Amino acid sequence: MKTYSRPMAGWWRRNPYYLWYMLREASCIFITAYALVLLAGLARLAQGEAAFQAWLESLSGPGSLAFHAAALILVLYHAWTWFKVMPKTLPFIRFGGRRVPDAAIVSIGVASAAAASTALFVAIGWFGLWSVQ
Amino acid sequence: MSYERVLALVHSGFGKLALLAVISLFLFHGCHRMYHCLHDFGIHVGAGLKALFHGFAAAGTAAAACLLLLIG
């Protein structure tokens, strides 16, 4: 038996809200591609200096810059939307007998993400990149 | 981002952990959401596709771990 399924082609183009949703979802392609670029860099690093330099040079073109800029913007937008819905997805949190306001949940979430990213960035600099003169 | 500096980063335990975390978590996050995007486009996904997407992320994680150990 074949059950009826409602046609759903192009649903996300009918409403600007859905278009923003799909744009946000498109970030998954950029995030996966970015991870693969890093993985390729690791493979080139293992092959030696010449291979690593070639990988670095391959990332200096305008296409690569555009990709990385788009990936950064999309991942920031994704992070923002993620924390924006957090008050709706979390059970009510009480602190000192009062419900924690939505705005506090969003700002704590955004601040934690910013702090974690900055900490990783600084730590990578300290432990590795600037350890060799 | 010179060769020596990136090599020093990968030689450190912290650098290994940070790179593995970034590559692995981004891969799993991206592949997991691509799998869910198929649903949004009306493609009915089964266990096979789920295994394919998550397996790809797992393979990438294993490759990164092997490379990090290989570089030493």
Image: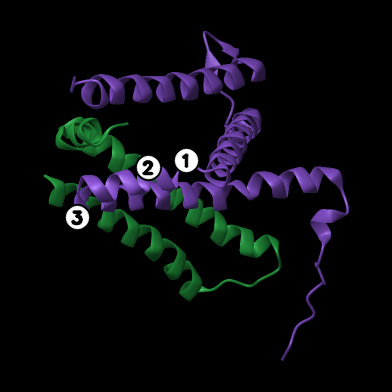
Q: Nearer the viewer, mark 2 or mark 3?
A: 2
In this figure, which residue is indicated by the disc labeled 3? B66
Nearer to us in this view, A63 or A103:
A63
Chain shown purple: that is A
- Tag 1, which chain? A
Which quadrant of the figure contains the C terminus of chain B?
top left
Is A58 on the left-hand or right-hand side of A17? left
Residue beneath the point at 45% across and 44% down: A59
Where, by quadrant of the figure, is residue B8 drawn? top left
Kind of residue indicated by mark 3: Cys
In this figure, which residue is indicated by the disc labeled 1? A60
- Tag 2, which chain? A
- Kindly identify which numbered label has been placed on residue A56: 2
Alpha carbons under labels 1 and 2: distance apart = 7 Å
Q: Provide the secondary structure element on which disc 2 rests.
A: helix
Compared to residue A123, the image places residue B48 above or below, namely below
- Tag 3, which chain? B
Residue beneath the point at 31% across and 44% down: A53
Compared to residue B46, the image places residue A10 above or below, namely above
Question: Outermost residue, bottom direction?
Answer: A1
Find residue B12 and report its horizontal and vertical position in percent: 16, 32
